[in-house]
Amino acid sequence: MKESTVFHWCMHWLDYEGTQVIAYEDDASRKILAIGKFTNATTDNVIGVFKRAEDIARAYRGKITAVNTDRGTQFYASGGEKKKKGVSRFEEYLNARGVKHIPSKRNSPQTNDRIERWFLEYKRHRWRFDTAYAFAECYNNRVHGALDLEYFETQNEAVIRKMRCENTLGMFIEWSEREVSL
């Protein structure tokens, strides 16, 4: 079982009904931590949603340590014939924060299989919700077969269960201080 709240994320773009959807999924809990819907799949949009995801990780008193992506131009600067591999703006952003970038192997979608599976659910059920965010919230609050089925665990519960003790304690102290000051 993976220790969490040192998040390792999978992220990917989906072309859905003429819009570009990006989602960031925690590898251990399967929780969708951030989602964005855009006209174009750009590096600026990737970084913008990643910043929201960092804020959510901080709310869990966690840190993102690694991100698995495909080799899309928004994430990865590939080299070509007679050309050295460069560094993309997204990779520079990750490097500045000490986050390891793990690009998937070429033509190997199974390395990003969890987020690909989530996108399958997104395509099936998105129409039932007013927003992509509402869908992600519903998804995070349903029982997930890859988690603890004996206790009907949801992704929101799994992210807490998989947290390190010091993170949970820190969240509890922050919560109790807020409650006392009310």
Image (cartoon, helix red, strand yellow):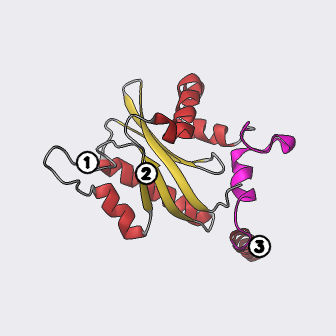
Residue at the image point whose x is 37% and y is 39% from the top: 106
Q: Distance between the residues labelled 3 and 2?
A: 30 Å
**Contact check, label 3 and label 2, Cβ < 8 Å:** no
Residue at numbered disc 3: 176
Q: What element carries label 3?
A: helix
Q: What element carries label 2?
A: helix
Marks 1, 2: nearer the viewer: 1
Residue 7 % position (x, y):
57, 59
Residue at the image point whose x is 71% and y is 54% from the top: 1
Residue 126 is at least partly visible in this image: yes
Q: Specify start and end residues of the magenta stretch as a single range.
A: 144-166
The amino acid at mark 2 is Val
User: In the image, 49: left or right of 176?
Assistant: left
Marks 3, 2: nearer the viewer: 2
Which sits earlier in the primary sequence, circle 1 or circle 2? Answer: 2
The image shows residue 101, relative to residue 178, as above or below, that is: above
Residue at numbered disc 2: 49
Residue at the image point whose x is 70% and y is 49% from the top: 156
Asked whether 56 falls inside the magenta stretch, the response is no
Residue 77 % position (x, y):
26, 50
Query: 15 or 182: which is nearer to us?
Result: 15
Residue at far right of view: 150
Residue 174 % position (x, y):
69, 73
Q: Distance between the residues labelled 1 and 3?
A: 48 Å
Residue 141, quarter of picture: top right
Which sits earlier in the primary sequence, circle 3 or circle 2? Answer: 2
Q: How crowded is mark 2: few (under 14 residues within 10 Å), some or many (20 or more)?
A: some
User: In the image, 74: left or right of 61?
Assistant: left
**Contact check, label 1 and label 2, Cβ < 8 Å:** no
Residue at numbered disc 1: 78
Q: Residue 69 has which mark?
A: none
Query: 40 or 101: which is nearer to us?
Result: 101
